[in-house]
Image (cartoon, rainbow, N blue to C red):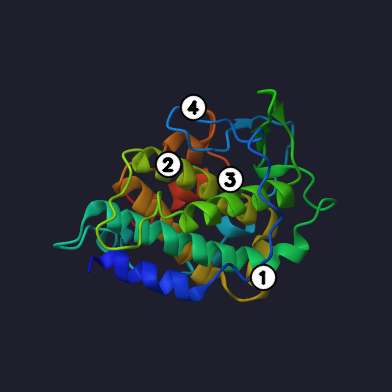
């Protein structure tokens, strides 16, 4: 039995997410790719938000808070005798589960009124591409519900994340997983921007920082991470999680 197959059995036992999400949007909302998969399409768009105050997650001692010391590259390396597809699948599953739990804890603070846009930092918010191929602003809880429901449905799809012996990953898996990674990155980015005070209130910053640093290191190692999604506009100072990425690189937690 393969490594991911054994994990898959535990996934099936664990059942669906405990945090209830909105129903999956209609297929018209998710443009269909040439492979026949329904993928949500999103894009970053600049806003006129301007804040001179340094985010808490960039301040000491919070930026240094972590459960793991040293460079995260050491914990994302492919283990011997493990198939790379299975390794990526297992880790994406774990990232999703952990991020979903964090969001579930702070979700009552993420409302239509408190988070009317999917903001991720000064001058940065994410827009949704609707069925008419137009960029639209969605409230953060709606955006995140759509993304998390979509990812959960993929995890439950045996054709995308096979858990049974003899079932192979589809040829479209690398492209799908990169899209999943990008969407999860945006959920992380919003939580850091809008809900880090709640993370601090729960005294969970070492856990959340370690999860995100692990996520970034993993994406960098397996070419899932597009640096422009982290840094923002090329040639401009990094904003939001981009500034956090730069700080962690200076500290030796992440590689460039």
Q: Is residue 255 above or below residue 196?
A: above
SS at badge 1: helix
Mark nearest the camera among 1 and 4 is: 1
Of circles 1 and 2, the one toward us is: 2
Pointer 4 or 3: first along the chain: 4
Left or right: residue 161 versus residue 202 is left
Separation (CA) of disc 1 from disc 2: 27 Å
Calculate the distance from the C-alpha at mark 1 to the C-alpha at mark 4. Answer: 34 Å
101, 63: nearer the viewer = 101
Number of numbered discs: 4
Where does the image place residue 134, in percent across and percent down from the top left? 69, 23
Dot 2: few (<14), some (14–19), or many (≥20) neighbours within 10 Å? some
Q: What secondary structure is found at the residue carrying circle 4?
A: loop
Q: Distance from label 3 to label 1 (Cα)?
A: 22 Å
Closest to the observer, 82 or 57? 82
Crowding at label 3, few (<14), some or many (≥20) Cα neighbours within 10 Å? Answer: many
Residue 253 vertical position relative to residue 243 in the rendered view, above or below: below
- Badge 4 density bin: few <14, some 14–19, many ≥20, Cα 10 Å: few
Q: Which residue is mark 2?
A: 176
Q: Label 4, label 2: how many angstroms apart (C-alpha)?
A: 25 Å
Percent x, y for residue 149?
Answer: 61, 53
Residue identified by numbered label 4: 234
Mark 1 lies on residue: 105
Give me the C-alpha separation between circle 2 and circle 3. 25 Å
In the picture, the disc for residue 240 is: 3
Q: Which of the 4 image quadrants contains residue 194?
A: bottom right
Q: Is residue 124 visible?
A: no
Q: Residue at x 75, y 58 (%)?
A: 110
Marks 1 and 2, the one that precedes in the sequence:
1
Task: Give the residue displayed 63% in from the left and 56% down from the top.
Answer: 191
């Amino acid at each position: 039995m393969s490594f991911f197959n054994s994990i898959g059995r535990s996934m099936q036992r664990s059942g669906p997410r405990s945090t209830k999400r909105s129903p999956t949007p209609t297929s018209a909302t998710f443009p269909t790719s040439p492979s026949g998969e329904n993928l949500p399409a999103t894009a970053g768009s600049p806003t006129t938000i301007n804040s001179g105050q340094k985010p808490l997650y960039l301040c000491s001692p919070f930026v240094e808070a972590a459960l793991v010391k040293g460079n995260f590259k050491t914990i994302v390396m492919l283990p011997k005798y493990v198939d790379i597809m299975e390794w990526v699948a297992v880790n994406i599953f774990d990232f999703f589960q952990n991020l979903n739990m964090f969001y579930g804890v702070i979700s009552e603070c993420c409302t239509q009124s408190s988070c009317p846009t999917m903001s991720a930092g000064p001058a940065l918010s994410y827009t949704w591409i609707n069925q008419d191929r137009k960029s639209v602003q969605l409230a953060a809880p709606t955006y995140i519900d759509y993304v998390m429901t979509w990812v959960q449905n993929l995890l439950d799809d045996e054709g995308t994340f096979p858990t049974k012996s003899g079932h192979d990953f589809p040829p479209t898996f690398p492209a799908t997983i990169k899209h999943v990674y990008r969407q999860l990155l945006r959920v992380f980015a919003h939580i850091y921007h809008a809900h880090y005070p709640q993370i601090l209130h729960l005294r969970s910053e070492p856990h959340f920082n370690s999860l995100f640093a692990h996520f970034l290191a993993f994406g960098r190692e397996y070419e899932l991470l597009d640096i422009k999604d982290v840094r923002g506009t090329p040639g401009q100072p990094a904003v939001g999680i981009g500034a956090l990425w730069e700080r962690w690189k200076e500290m030796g937690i992440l590689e460039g």
